[in-house]
């Protein structure tokens, strides 16, 4: 990204695009503490080790199945992680498990191979049950399935490329928080850039609403002046909110209520502009 593009992103308040899981490499999110659950016993750990070794043996990474997570098994795990562009640490976390048992899926082939249809059907079942796709599971990775995958990826902060790799599988299978159902679901399917411009539009509109309905005596400004003033005042509202003794609540039944301070800022736009001018003149 060149200097001009970086300046444009900075001036608009946009975050510079960063690759999610660059080169499909795993982010180190896990330590050596196991995932605990009711019924967690040494037997369940042993079953997991057996399953791990059987899969590594089948794929040619392990020569002997010992039933123990020994040095040979660790080296096999590291080799598997290296081959699949995962973090090479010998720790079998959610991404390594997903890569071991779930194939990479995408809409590259017009006809889904038979050996992948079960995985596609499981993917479609999750998307269908959670409302990301209206297509019932049939085992074929078509355009509608790809759209559902992209919606899911946008919601959970993954790169929305429609490619179901280890990271997407791990999140699909449970490495995530629940969606806040109280918020309009359509918002989750929109791009971050669209949401940014939509929020800017709401803030400026609320300030203009306050400007043209201000009870303070004096003529209302022309529309172009009001727009420029409103855009400038959007930068001041956060500082005003910090100065005012208001109780901030993250949960509200009226999502648009958070824009009320912008209307108030528009109503008192003249005193605010005069005060800012006084500060600059004094400096």
Image: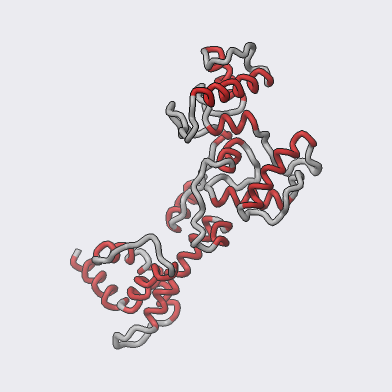
Give above or below for 228 relative to 216: above
The residue positioned farthest toward the left in the image shown: 282
Dividing the picture into quarters, in which one does residue 244 lie?
bottom left
The one of 118 and 269 positioned closer to us in this rendering: 118
Identify the image quadrant of the C terminus.
Answer: bottom left
Q: In x, y percent, where is residue 221?
A: 38, 82
Name which residue lies at 52% across and 55% down.
192
Residue 127 placement (x, y as % from top left): 64, 50
Give the side of residue 216 with respect to residue 21, left or right.
left
User: Which residue occupies 55% across, 52% down?
Assistant: 155
Q: Position of residue 56 (x, y in %)?
A: 63, 20
Q: Is residue 87 left or right of residue 135?
A: left
254 left or right, relative to 61: left
Q: Is residue 64 above or below residue 1?
A: above
**What color scheme is it?**
secondary structure
Q: Quadrant of residue 98?
A: top right
Task: Name the foreground residue: 232 vs 131.
Answer: 131
Please tell me how many numbered marks the rendered image carries: 0
Tell which of 151 and 249 is nearer to you: 249
Q: Quadrant of residue 225?
A: bottom left
Say which residue appears at 42% left-offset and 69% top-offset. Answer: 203
Percent position (x, y) of residue 32? 43, 26
Residue lying at 49% horizontally and 23% vertically, measured from the top left: 42
Q: Residue furthest front?
A: 39
């Amino acid at each position: 990204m060149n200097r001009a593009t970086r300046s444009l992103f900075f001036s608009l308040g946009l975050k510079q695009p960063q690759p999610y899981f660059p080169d499909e490499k795993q982010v180190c999110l896990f330590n050596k503490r196991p995932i605990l659950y009711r019924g967690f016993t040494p037997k369940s750990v042993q079953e997991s080790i057996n399953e791990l070794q059987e899969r590594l043996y089948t794929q040619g990474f392990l020569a002997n199945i010992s039933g123990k997570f020994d040095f040979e098994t660790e080296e096999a795990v590291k080799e598997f992680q290296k081959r699949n562009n995962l973090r090479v640490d010998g720790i079998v976390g959610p991404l390594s498990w997903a890569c071991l048992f779930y194939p990479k899926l995408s809409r590259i082939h017009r006809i889904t191979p038979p050996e992948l249809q079960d995985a596609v059907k499981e993917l479609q079942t999750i998307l269908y049950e959670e409302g990301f796709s209206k297509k019932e599971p049939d085992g074929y990775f078509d355009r509608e399935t790809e759209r559902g995958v992209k919606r899911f990826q946008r919601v959970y902060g993954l790169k929305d490329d429609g490619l179901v790799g280890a990271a997407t599988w791990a999140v699909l299978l449970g490495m995530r928080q629940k969606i806040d159902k109280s918020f309009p679901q359509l918002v989750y399917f929109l791009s971050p850039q669209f949401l940014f411009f939509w929020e800017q539009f709401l803030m400026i509109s609320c300030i203009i609403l306050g400007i043209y309905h201000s009870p303070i005596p004096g003529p209302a400004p022309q529309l172009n002046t009001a727009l420029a003033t409103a855009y400038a005042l959007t930068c001041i509202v956060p500082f005003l909110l910090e100065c005012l003794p208001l109780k901030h609540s993250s949960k509200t039944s009226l999502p648009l209520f958070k824009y009320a301070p912008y209307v108030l800022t528009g109503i008192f736009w003249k005193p605010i502009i005069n005060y800012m001018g006084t500060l600059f003149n004094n400096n």
